[in-house]
């Protein structure tokens, strides 16, 4: 199929075929990062601005590195180092970037819908790097890429997403991607953080942690999003860890080949024990490696190359 989208705003709006095209393109780009010269000319002459108005380590660095590996010029803007601290609006900041002929704006923002707000007003391509508790499309793409790479498929697998679903953009984007690709998704966590309304997205919701652990082929752990909570939805962090932390005893309940995933940043000793995070079943750092390839693929496709096969990373 041909890629026709100018923006990457949500997984909700992508078809299974579009998701698969990104994964296939990322598989080609993954090899580039193992070369001595880790660069291809696909975005030579283009300018990529990363506008991160919330903290980020993985997403910001891998988007900037992806752009550099595609030979684009890059600029990085954070809230603290921009005129947003002087009261400039998101729209005006973005219009000023466009006035300097930026081709791509990668936006992380606390407001759900802010990437679409920019896409409706600017001519350049907008990539959503996480908007509030709404979506984090490239995280979901790198997660399904990692599952497909490690287990050979996504369809038919039992994927358990555990933790703070209510406030998680990672969970929302993962649910869309996994369901579209045919996985069986189960959500588990404190009932206050995993409301039954999520069943409307085609997933199972349970508080029976041990049963969910035994069935899972993939466990994707989420951290507690302190920064998004307005009130206490569980008694304490210690109580959360006792009830839902993936410790070694619970890890022994899982299938021998289970994949342990986490989008990061991990809170060791809270949602995941160090022994589990560092175990051979953990693919947490491989997710980060794959994030680079997926973000190269996203930029490459949005740049308007209609046929990835006609312009492979080797060209
Ligand atoms: N997974 C993720 O979005 O991490 P960062 O917040 O560090 O970008």
Image: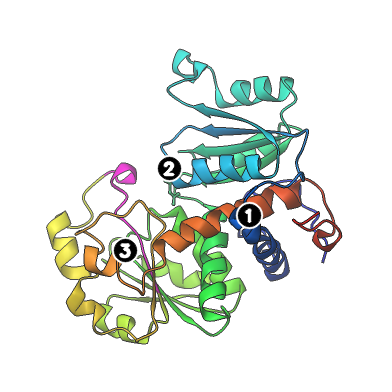
Q: Earlier in the sequence, mark 3 or mark 2?
A: 2
Callout 2 crowding tier (Cα within 10 Å): few <14, some 14–19, many ≥20? few
Q: Which image quadrant is residue 54 in?
A: top left
Q: Position of residue 263 (x, y in %)?
A: 42, 57
Callout 1 crowding tier (Cα within 10 Å): few <14, some 14–19, many ≥20? few
Image mark for residue 163: 3
Give the mark toward the camera: 3 or 2.
2
- Whether the residues at callouts 1 and 3 have beta carbons within 8 Å, the answer is no
Residue 45 vs 303, above or below: the answer is above
Find numbered disc 3 in the image and state the secondary structure of the residue it sits on.
loop
Q: Which residue is mark 1?
A: 35
Callout 3 crowding tier (Cα within 10 Å): few <14, some 14–19, many ≥20? many
**Start-end of magenta stretch:** 219-230
Task: Judge left or right: residue 42 versus residue 63.
Answer: right
Q: Earlier in the sequence, mark 1 or mark 3?
A: 1
- Whether the residues at callouts 3 and 2 have beta carbons within 8 Å, the answer is no
Quarter of the figure that contains the C terminus = bottom right
Q: How many marks?
A: 3
Instruction: Give the CA separation, mark 2 to mark 1.
Output: 24 Å
Q: Which residue is mark 2?
A: 57
Q: Position of residue 206 (x, y in %)?
A: 33, 77
Tell me what residue is drawn at x 56 percent, y 26 percent: 90
Find numbered disc 1 in the image and state the secondary structure of the residue it sits on.
loop
Q: Earlier in the sequence, mark 2 or mark 1?
A: 1
Tell me what residue is drawn at x 48 percent, y 15 percent: 87
Residue 155 vs 90, above or below: the answer is below
Task: Judge left or right: residue 165 versus residue 314.
Answer: left
Residue 229, magenta (yes or no):
yes
Q: Position of residue 131 (x, y in %)?
A: 51, 44
């Amino acid at each position: 199929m041909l890629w026709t989208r100018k923006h990457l705003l949500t997984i909700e709006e992508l078809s299974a075929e579009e998701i698969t095209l990104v994964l296939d393109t990322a598989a080609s780009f993954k090899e580039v990062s193992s070369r001595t010269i880790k660069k291809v000319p696909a975005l030579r002459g283009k300018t990529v601005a990363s506008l991160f108005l919330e903290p980020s380590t993985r997403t910001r660095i891998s988007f900037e590195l992806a752009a550099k590996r595609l030979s684009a010029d890059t600029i990085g803007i954070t809230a603290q180092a921009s005129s947003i601290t002087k009261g400039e609006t998101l729209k005006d900041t973005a219009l000023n970037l466009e006035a300097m002929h930026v081709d791509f704006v990668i936006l992380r923002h606390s407001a759900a819908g802010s990437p679409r707000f920019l896409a409706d007003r600017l001519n350049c391509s907008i990539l959503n790097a996480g908007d509030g508790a709404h979506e984090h499309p490239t995280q979901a793409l790198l997660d399904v890429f990692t599952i497909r790479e490690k287990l050979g498929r996504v369809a038919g697998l039992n994927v358990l997403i555990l933790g703070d679903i209510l406030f998680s953009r990672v969970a929302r984007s993962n649910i869309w991607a996994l369901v579209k690709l045919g996985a069986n998704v189960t959500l588990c966590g404190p009932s206050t953080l995993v409301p039954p309304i999520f069943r409307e997205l085609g997933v199972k919701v349970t508080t029976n942690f041990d049963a969910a652990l035994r069935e899972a082929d993939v466990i994707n752990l989420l951290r507690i999003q302190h920064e998004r909570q307005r009130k206490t939805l569980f008694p304490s962090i210690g109580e959360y860890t006792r009830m839902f932390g993936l410790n070694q005893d619970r890890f022994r309940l899982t299938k021998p080949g289970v994949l342990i995933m986490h989008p990061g940043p991990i809170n060791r000793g809270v949602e995941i024990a160090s022994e589990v995070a560092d175990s051979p079943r953990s693919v947490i750092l491989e997710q980060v490696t794959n994030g680079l390839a997926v973000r190269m693929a996203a930029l490459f496709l949005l740049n308007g190359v209609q046929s990835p096969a006609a312009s492979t990373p080797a060209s």
